[in-house]
Amino acid sequence: MAKQKKKRYNAGLSGNPNMVQTEKAKDLKGSLKKLLRYLKPYQAKLLLIAILLLTATFLSILGPMFMGQATNTIVEGIKAKYAQTGSLNYAKLQHTLLLLTILYVVANILYLFEGVLLAKMSQQITYQLRKEIDAKINKLPLSYFDHESTGDILSRITNDAQTMSESLGQILERILSGIVSIVGILYMMLKISVPMTIMALMVVPLFGVCTSTFVKKSQKYFKTQQEMLGSVNGHIEEMYGAHLVMKAFSGEDKSLQTFQEKNEALKDSAWKAQFLSGCLFPMSKTITNIGYVFVAILGGSLAIQGTITIGGIQAFFQYMNQFSWPITSVAQIANVLQSTAAASERVFEFLEQEEIQEDTKSPVTHNIQGNVTFEHVNFGYNNDEIIIHDFSIEVKQGMTVAIVGPTGAGKTTLVKLLMRFYPIQSGAIYVDGININDYTRKDLRDAFGMVLQDAWLQNGTIMDNIRYGNMQASDEEVMQAADAAYVDHFIKTLEDGYQTIINEDSSNISYGQKQLLTIARAFLKDPKILILDEATSNVDTRTEILIQKGMNNLMQNRTAFVIAHRLSTIKNADLILVLDHGDIVEAGKHDELLAKNGFYSNLYNAQFEHNEGEH
């Protein structure tokens, strides 16, 4: 049971900023340069977003100033009333409050439009990235998937692409609004009172040290939390997938103990992470409040001296309250950039993988009949380890060729080479006398039908699963194919018949029924060449007979390559190739090979000895 691959970083910047993972990109500058290329088509939109954001931020900064003016108007009115020299200037107050209301309404409308445009741009970039990744998957050689896990590839398509686009948009937003806010607020504070600004700035280094300390300490626990969360999820997934095995071996107690250990570790790391990050806000607030005390004392002194108004003090406190956010926001950008660059690096690493060789510029158009020739073929999954040595055979149209041999002999590799899943090191393979490299991959593979040992069905109706062999087939043709594969009767016994939904892991039908459906799918395709990876060893005798009948029907008048596991099923093959370590050690018909009393005979007799031993 494969262990679930751990997630590398948190997807996105929303929520607690400390949860951004700290995994660093190998080439930060290079990754960001590649990422910025995706912004080129959106230059006009980016300019509009920047204008809206800067304008909204600027208007928001002006808010406390107007609030201070309104406060001063009220204070002056109260003083005038008590001095009996006048009254509150309602017209001026109304005018100031109206301007303040308009200013905040316009600012929030601009923020709204900016947010919508930014979100739309982020999703368009995500869409483009996933589109490129999906297209890339179909262009990669199978050798890439031999050493990459499915979970890792899916993570690049989902988590990493999402992290890239969302983080990029929020980085732009934070940098632009943060810098403008810092400069604008600092200017307004200095304009109100230079001494009070100096006093307020004295707590900034303490604030920065506090923030960086708590962020650094909490990040390692957040990282551990994510790792342990993956470990817990992986354990649950394994136990769910192997539930019957776990029950059969009475592994409930061991499973529960393992879960409790992992869950305890998750709880411990999550508690520490949440505690430390939770401490950041009150600590920062305490430092800010200490700054308020000293600024208030200084402001009161200046107000007594008459060098600052009450409204000015009130506006200054508003600016001081706003000042900590952009500092924290801009300070976090370094970690965010690292996380974004790490995600980008993984995506671009995938997109830059070497693709399969292009099809020939002038492909042959030929109605394939099914003659196959291997001519001095040598192949290895890497150049240092050749596993097929000087392989040569000639197969005439309509022949059934069985390929047998011990595990690792190269049986499956041969059919992969025939379908151009891997390029050969030397030699050539011909179909109807034409080198397979002179066909397009699509034209070549359209001539093949496959029934594999691991029967694959998708989540959908039985009708759709059979129709996968020929998407243009009518319902009637699908039913005819099912009848030829001896699966029609079974389908009609189901409540919903051909509209029965097969679930995601095909667990609502038996293994043998899955095989019969894949045979029906191959019938519907009506190929000239068949590849059959016999899969009758895990089914009951009655189903095995049906599968064998279905495959026999399917092989009629078609060239067939049968990878045989039960040697008793290939007695009637026109040619049996016996492979060992990539070499043909024997070739002939069943009776001929038995009479030689050689490698094939040993394999055949060992199979029956094994069966007798079981009884």
Image: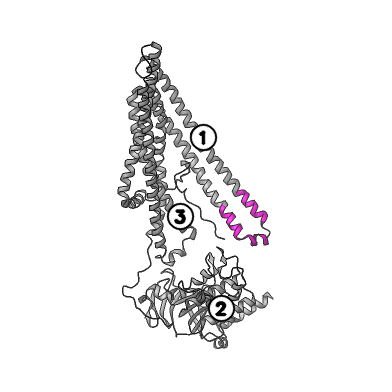
> Disc 1 or 2, which lies upstream in sequence?
1
Q: CA distance from mark 3 to mark 2?
A: 41 Å
Residue 279: which numbered mark, if any?
A: 1
Which quadrant holds the N terminus? Answer: bottom right
Q: Can you say whether 366 is above or below 54 in the image?
A: below
Q: Amino acid at mark 2?
A: Asp
Residue bearing the label numbered 2: 483
Answer with the quarter of the image where residue 86 lies.
Answer: top left
Find out whether residue 239 is within the magenta segment: yes
Residue 225: which numbered mark, if any?
A: none
Query: Counting other residues with Cα less than 10 Å from the Cα at mark 2, is it few (<14), some (14-19), or many (20 or more)?
Result: some
> Disc 1 or 3, which lies upstream in sequence?
3
Q: Give the total number of marks visible in the rendering.
A: 3
Q: Amino acid at mark 1?
A: Cys
In the rendered view, how is the structure colored? Answer: one colour
Asked if the residues shown at circle 3 and circle 2 are in contact, with their CB atoms under 8 angstroms apart, the answer is no
Find out whether residue 391 is within the magenta segment: no
Which residues, given as a range, are shown in magenta? 233-261
Answer with the quarter of the image where residue 497 lies.
Answer: bottom right
